[in-house]
Image: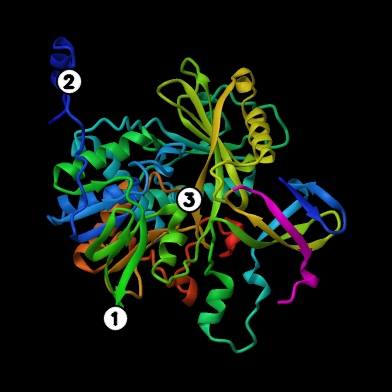
């Protein structure tokens, strides 16, 4: 599996660290209720198909939101998290 | 038909013409009292104990493929009860006791072999942690023996005791640990459940869960609608898709875990050996193949196959520990779809929907849990109260933060187990 880093081009999967679903980009506001935090931290759609998740590219230290297919391992796109509107 | 050595003998003399299919292939009825979604190890054992222990009739198991087509046939077959945390400890202890009587119970040879499990340690700190774990196992009533380096050398003389990266300090020996024939466990429970009147319906995919006024009323399937008073979701790696039909999001992320088997060799590895520092564990099947695996690939996946970096890592770890296996040729490798929970421990619980139950979150350890998982889910469905040894496998522990069971001590977060 190769992931196209926007900074470095297509790179080997070993250079990346997986963090989890892009739910992590929607951090609840201070004072949000338990359900909001549960949704943010634990509950997942966990789709069999196209998903968006967060990967860290160790060499260039970029956090990426990767759109990929969990059934075929096809990578559809990768964008810096800083450019993704939360 | 009861199986016995005598029957094998007489059938052998009469051309083996007297064998019958081990279970029926019934058409789905319009309604059941209980429907189990998922005909794997956990679903089949649940159905078996509902019928056997609780005397319930009118039960169906719905399986979208064939019985035992998921993780029950894709694991590395290790059976053990070496857990530490309250909640896990009593559950797996109970499961091992069920394993020890399983063949008699099912009249089916699951080839359960208590050949002993040895978890190696490689530092003083790890020795202390394993001594503590061993004490917890003894306190639970199970068996554990702390081996020093020479004790390990006596049992596993083929390990590389000279390597300096992870010098072998000793091992925690669990004599009652071992392995079993994984498919046979599914088949044994299937046959047992069928004989007790459970309908095992294959090629029947659930496409919807019917809920009226907060109560489950049945399921939609590729073979028509079926009504039910109670429904259990026992779908392992596919749990999230099944729960979504009930409008639920589960605290589950599905990951790929790879395993490998070599060509058949003469007996060479007598135990189950785990090398935690290298993420490697190995045993030898009765057919002679070395069965081994490592850690997750560590990203969400339903591909049922992994990537090469983890293949390389597992092979390196194996060569570090036991260079003698270097000439063995790998016959095949595969990936299972693991239902990973944030804290690494399972869930057996009711849901907020009346009559709907969930059994998931087995991470990479569901095989040894099959008997107790079915036992406890059956208890929950039949009595509406959690079984004492599974009372802590609550669905709401992530929301409340109470009762998390992080056996590895790495944190209750999706990417850490």
User: Alpha carbon of mark 2 to alpha carbon of mark 1: how far?
Assistant: 54 Å
- State which region is magenta: A72-86
Which of the two marks, 3 or 2, is nearer to us in this view?
Answer: 2
Closer to the camera, B85 or B251?
B251
Q: Residues within 10 Å of mark 1 (few under 14, many from 20)?
A: few
Q: Locate residue A76: give its quadrant.
A: bottom right
Q: Is residue A10 above or below residue B330?
A: below
- Residue B408 location (% of width, % of height): 55, 55
Residue at disc 1, secondary structure: loop
**Residue beneath the point at 42% across and 53% down:** B236
Name the residue that disc number 3 marks: B133
Closer to the camera, B405 or A16?
A16
**Residue beneath the point at 65% across and 31% down:** B315
Q: Is residue B12 above or below residue A8?
A: above
Q: What chain does badge 1 belong to?
A: B
Question: In this image, B132 relative to B189: left or right?
Answer: right
- Residue B152 location (% of width, % of height): 53, 30
Name the residue that disc number 2 marks: B5
Q: Residues within 10 Å of mark 3 (few under 14, many from 20)?
A: some
Q: What chain does badge 3 belong to?
A: B
Q: Locate residue B115: give its quadrant.
A: top left
Name the residue that disc number 1 marks: B213
């Amino acid at each position: 599996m190769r992931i196209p880093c926007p900074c470095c081009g297509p790179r080997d999967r070993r250079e990346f660290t997986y963090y989890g679903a892009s739910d992590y980009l929607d951090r609840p506001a201070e004072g949000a209720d338990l359900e909001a935090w549960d949704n943010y931290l634990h509950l997942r759609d966990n789709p069999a198909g196209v998903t968006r998740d967060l990967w860290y590219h160790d060499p260039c230290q970029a956090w990426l939101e990767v759109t990929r297919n969990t059934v075929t391992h096809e990578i559809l796109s990768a964008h810096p998290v800083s450019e993704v509107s939360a | 038909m009861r199986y016995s050595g005598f029957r094998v003998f007489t059938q052998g003399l009469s051309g083996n013409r007297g064998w019958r299919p081990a279970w029926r292939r019934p058409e789905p009825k319009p309604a059941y009292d209980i429907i189990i979604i998922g005909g794997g190890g956990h679903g089949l054992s649940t159905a078996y104990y509902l019928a056997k222990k609780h005397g319930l009739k009118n039960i169906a198991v719905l399986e979208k493929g064939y019985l035992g087509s998921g993780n029950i046939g894709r694991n590395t077959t290790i059976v053990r009860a070496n857990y530490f945390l309250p909640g896990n400890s009593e559950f797996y202890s109970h499961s091992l006791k069920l394993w020890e009587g399983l063949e008699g119970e099912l009249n089916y040879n699951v080839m359960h072999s208590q050949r002993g499990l040895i978890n190696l340690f490689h530092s003083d700190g790890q020795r202390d942690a394993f001594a503590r774990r061993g004490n917890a196992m003894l306190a639970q009533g199970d068996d554990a023996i702390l081996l020093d380096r020479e004790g390990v050398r006596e049992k596993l003389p083929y390990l590389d005791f000279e390597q300096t990266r992870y010098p072998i300090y000793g091992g925690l020996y669990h004599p009652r640990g071992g392995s079993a024939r994984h498919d046979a466990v599914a088949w044994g429970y299937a046959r047992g459940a069928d004989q007790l009147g459970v309908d095992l319906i294959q090629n029947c995919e659930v496409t919807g869960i019917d809920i009226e006024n907060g109560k489950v009323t049945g399921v939609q399937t590729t073979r028509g609608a079926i009504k039910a008073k109670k429904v259990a979701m026992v779908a392992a790696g596919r749990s999230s898709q099944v729960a979504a039909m009930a409008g639920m999001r589960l605290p589950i992320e599905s990951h790929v875990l790879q395993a490998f088997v070599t060509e058949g060799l003469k007996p060479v590895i007598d135990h189950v050996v785990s090398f935690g520092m290298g993420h490697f564990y190995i045993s030898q099947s009765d057919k002679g193949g070395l069965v081994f695996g490592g850690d997750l690939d560590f990203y969400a996946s339903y591909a049922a196959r992994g990537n090469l970096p983890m293949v390389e890592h597992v092979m390196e770890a194996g060569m570090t520990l036991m260079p003698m296996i270097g000439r063995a040729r790998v016959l095949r490798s595969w990936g299972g779809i693991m239902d990973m929970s944030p804290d690494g421990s399972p869930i057996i619980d009711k849901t907020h929907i009346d009559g709907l139950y969930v059994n998931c979150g087995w991470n990479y350890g569901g095989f040894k849990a099959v008997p107790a998982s079915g036992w406890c889910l059956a208890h929950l469905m039949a009595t509406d109260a959690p079984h004492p040894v599974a009372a802590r496998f609550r669905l709401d522990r992530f929301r409340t933060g109470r009762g998390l069971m992080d056996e590895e001590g790495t944190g209750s977060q999706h990417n850490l187990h």
